[in-house]
Every structure is written in C-alpha cells, then in structure tokens.
Image (tube, helix red, strand yellow):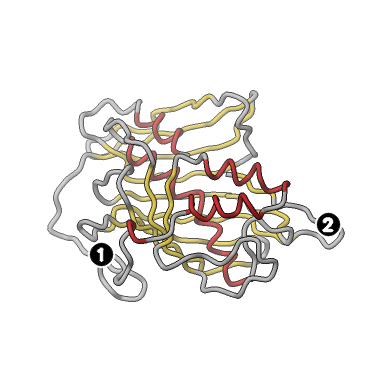
Amino acid sequence: MGQALHAAQLTVHRDSWLPISLHSYFLKRGSPNSDIIYQCRETSNLRSFDSRSVDAIQNGQIIFKMQAQFARPEESQLRHVERADGVTGMPRGVVAPDECLGMDDLLGDLMARAPAALLPLIEELRASPIEVRYAVGAPHDPLDPDPPSMPSRQLLWVRIREPITKAPGLDAACAAYISDQPLLLTALRPHRISFPSPKLGALATLDHSMWFHGPFDADDWLLYDMHAPFAGSGRALCFGHLYRPDTGQLVASCAQQGVLRLAKPTLKNKAALFAM
C-alpha cells in the first residue's frame, strides 16, 4: 500500500501537492519473492485536487488496487478534532515512548521460548522497518494458549526505524505502510486469541482507506490509537488514528476491513494465514 501511494505521488507534477486520501483493495495474496509493477493512471487533474488510480501487478495478475487523491496544503479557519469519546486531541495519560516496552524486547524474549515453527515469523518481525512500543503497558504473553479477554482497543507508539528522505509524499506512504500491519489484530483482543495462534484460520486485509490531515515525520514517533467496533460474518472492521506527540495533532485516520476466521476443527496446529 505504501509503495502504491508513492508510485502515485511520482505522477503528481505540482509543487507541494501531497496525498489527502487513499482507498485500496487487496485482491489476491502477493509474494515477496516476485517483482510488483505499479501501473498508475491520471484519473483527474483539477484546480484543487488530483486523483490517481494504481494497479499492482504481479506475475501478470492484478493483486491490489488503489485510488488516491492529492491536494496542496492550505490554511482553514474551520478546524476541530474530536475523538469518539468526545474528548478533543490526542489520548491523555499515555506514557512517553522512551519509557515504554518495545516490540524488539518482546521478540527477543520469545526467541528463547517459542517453538521452532514460529521462529521464522519472529525473525521476520524483528527485521521489520517499523519500530513499535507499547503505550499502555506490556502486552499479554503471545505464547499463552488461553489469554484473557481484552478491550477491542490498543495504543502503540510507531515510527520508521531509519531516517527517510524528505521527498514529497514519502512520509504519507510510510504511514500507510505502518497503519496496515497492526490494525486488524485489534479485533482479536476480545476473543482471547493472540497472534500467531493455532486457533486462527485466516487473518488478512480486504480493504483499507486512509485520510491525511496534517504534516508529520514518519521516522519520528506517532501514537497509533486503534479500535475494532465490529467482528462478525468472518470479517472485522477497525479504525485507527495517528497523532503527533509534540503537538497532540491528529495527522491521519484510517479504516480497515479484513478476513477474520477461526481454524476448522479438523485442522491441527495450523498457524494463521497472515497476508498483508
């Protein structure tokens, strides 16, 4: 998703124009071992907005589609930010990222305890370009086969590990990449299921939309507030908000629907299908 948005940005030839929204569909599972061609089309070039369509093509098949819109930043006197609980601005009482447990610490501990079948997944997560820290305390042990039920909300500090080039739209592309990975996992929390788990049969993104509200640096800490208000019919719906900690400003919002299914009883010790 991040690569598709960056490809679309490269076709926008107006100075200072940046992404304001994207709407995407994951059509087929992609392979990290094959090249992907991003085919961009100019769907509109208007006075205030540009729109682009992007097809991600792998092995001759369209595996992903995106529609993105771009505009130049502008000041507005009509401005407010309100969360679902009626409180304005960033969630309060969140511990600073430097004081929080990091996913790297958790994964290092898991390496010594996890069964051999999980080690490749743990190594993949440790190599992720995204740094994650838990904003509201340590998560429950992922190896616990019977974790407690948790609220369908989670708060994470997230950022790109390495400094990134400040090219137009690149921070938005990185934020799109960041936003996809943990969001659907929020829907597992009320159901006493950790990831990965043999209880899971399928966990995969179907569609993902995102809106960009203001400037930010994706290689600096952002607070990711996620909520999953619905799960049913083999799907889950999740919403997320990204905040800048220095200003408390809401800089991006997203919505995601994904497949969420239990493993069939006849399948034993089957790891979840996890496709991004």
Give the image location of residue 111, x and y in percent.
61, 49
Circle 1: element type: loop
Give the image location of residue 192, x and y in percent.
64, 70
Residue linked to disc 1: 81
Give the label on residue 67, or none: none
Question: What residue sits 65% from the left and 59% below the top?
Answer: 260
Q: Are marks 1 and 2 in contact (CB under 8 Å)?
A: no
Question: What residue sits 72% from the left and 47% below the top?
Answer: 116
Task: Answer with mark 1 or mark 2, whichever residue precedes in sequence.
Answer: 1
Separation of marks 1 and 2 at Cα, in angstroms: 47 Å
Give the image location of residue 191, x and y in percent.
63, 71
Q: Nearer the viewer, residue 138 or 55?
A: 138
Q: Is residue 204 left or right of residue 66?
A: right
Circle 2: element type: loop
**On-image quarter of the C terminus:** top right
Q: Nearer the viewer, residue 217 or 63?
A: 217
Give the image location of residue 61, x and y in percent.
64, 28
Question: Against 179, is 185 above or below?
Answer: below
Residue linked to disc 2: 268
Question: What residue sits 62% from the left and 27% below the top?
Answer: 33
Question: What residue sits 37% from the left and 47% below the top?
Answer: 159
Name the image quarter holding residue 225. bottom left
- Is the residue marked by circle 1 packed among few (<14), some (14-19), or many (20+) residues within 10 Å? few
Question: Against 91, is 5 above or below?
Answer: above
Residue kind at label 1, given as amino acid type: Val
Q: Is residue 229 left or right of residue 12?
A: right
Disc nearest the viewer among 1 and 2: 2
Residue kind at label 2, given as amino acid type: Lys
